[in-house]
Image: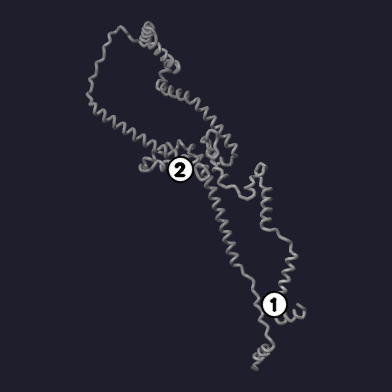
Amino acid sequence: MEESEVQDVEQNDPDAAIAEKWAEIQGRMTDDAPEEPTDEAATDESQEERAQKARDERGRFAKADAAAEGVEAPVGAETQPQAQAPTTPEGWDINRPPASLSPSAKTEWDKLPESWRREIHKREADAHRGVQQILPDARLGNQIRQMVEPYRSYLDASGTTPEAAVVGLLRTDQLLRTGTAAQKQQAFANLAQQYGIDLAAQQYAPEHPQQEFRDPRLDQFFAMQQRQEQQRMQGEQQRAEQEVGVWLNESDAQGKPLRPFVDNVHAEMVALIPAIQSQKPGASTREVMEEAYTRAVWANPATQSVLMQQKLAELEANRRAENLRKVEDAKRAASVNVARRGVVPPKPAALDMRDSIAENARALGLL
């Protein structure tokens, strides 16, 4: 098309001229722009880069299919089991302080490092094993002491010791049971002489007491009632022991015991429980234990001091929180009541010459 004809077309049809000019600009942009990689090439390049970067924790290349597709391993397959409370080899929970610690030491238990808590539990376990080894001997000695105690004054008056008296009785009993006939006769004669017994004196046999008639059916009935009563009492005792065990082992969301001072006030609780049961005959075992624990910890000087410190710390924290809340409220109130700067009113729009003359004429009273 000649230039004159193009000018004629532009004058006659401006829209066609604009469209032709736009097509020419797009052509130049297409020729000058660099070639962009296709979707397939970009996908291959990204897959190759991911395959080069995909390595496991040991520095080895991961599986090709997982690296190429960019698929992450399922989360459920690598999910670790929920961590349980750390324990010692003996099975003791290190979050719970040993029972032998004082109330003030138990409050500081959570501040100790885990290695210290494990070591303390280990020492407690060693001491527990040592006590278990000597416990049978201690029980035997305690039983013998209880048997000998009523005769303590007699042994002191006789000039002998409990150990010598027990050994003499056991030796005589063994001789009378296992010795020969001559040894038994000699031992018996020695005992008679020692205790002033005249073996030649005439002895009269004691009269046989008259036996009381008893109906075997009544004996069977009473025995059955006694067994039933024993079974009922055993069942109640087992249920009470289970409730007490659950109550003692209760803990909060962090695994800390709810009643950390039970071992420190055990004696006070044992003394309070009968009185509480008599005052509240319908109370459950849990209610009785809870009230006994509350009374005991506030009656024991050591636990009472710790509880008072905790209460004071709690009140101080609440006081600080309340003061902080009041300060924040005052700041918000002050920000609302602050006077704002005045805003300059906008200038009136300028009037044209005719409107300005008319406005001035009205002001002068000419119109």
- Image location of residue 229, percent across then percent down: 32, 34
Residue for badge 1: 16
Indicate left or right for 198 with 341 as reference: left
What SS does tag 1 mark? helix
**How far is disc 2 from disc 1 in space, using C-alphas?**
98 Å
Task: Work out whether 353 lies above or below 94.
Answer: below
Extreme residue toward the front, this view: 1
Which quarter of the picture shows residue 198? top left
**What's the residue type where badge 1 is placed?**
Ala
Quarter of the image where the N terminus is located = bottom right
**What's the residue type where badge 2 is placed?**
Thr
Q: Which mark is residue 197?
A: none
* Color encoding of the figure: one colour
Indicate left or right for 204 with 47 as reference: left
Q: Is residue 105 visible?
A: no
Extreme residue toward the right, this view: 3
Indicate left or right for 171 with 326 as reference: left
Label pair 2/1, CB-CB below 8 angstroms: no
Identity of the residue drawn at 73% across and 71% down: 24
- Image location of residue 41, percent across then percent down: 68, 55
351 or 320: nearer the viewer: 351
Q: Which mark is residue 294?
A: 2
Task: Work out whether 75 lies above or below 171.
Answer: below
Q: Nearer the viewer, mark 2 or mark 1?
A: 1
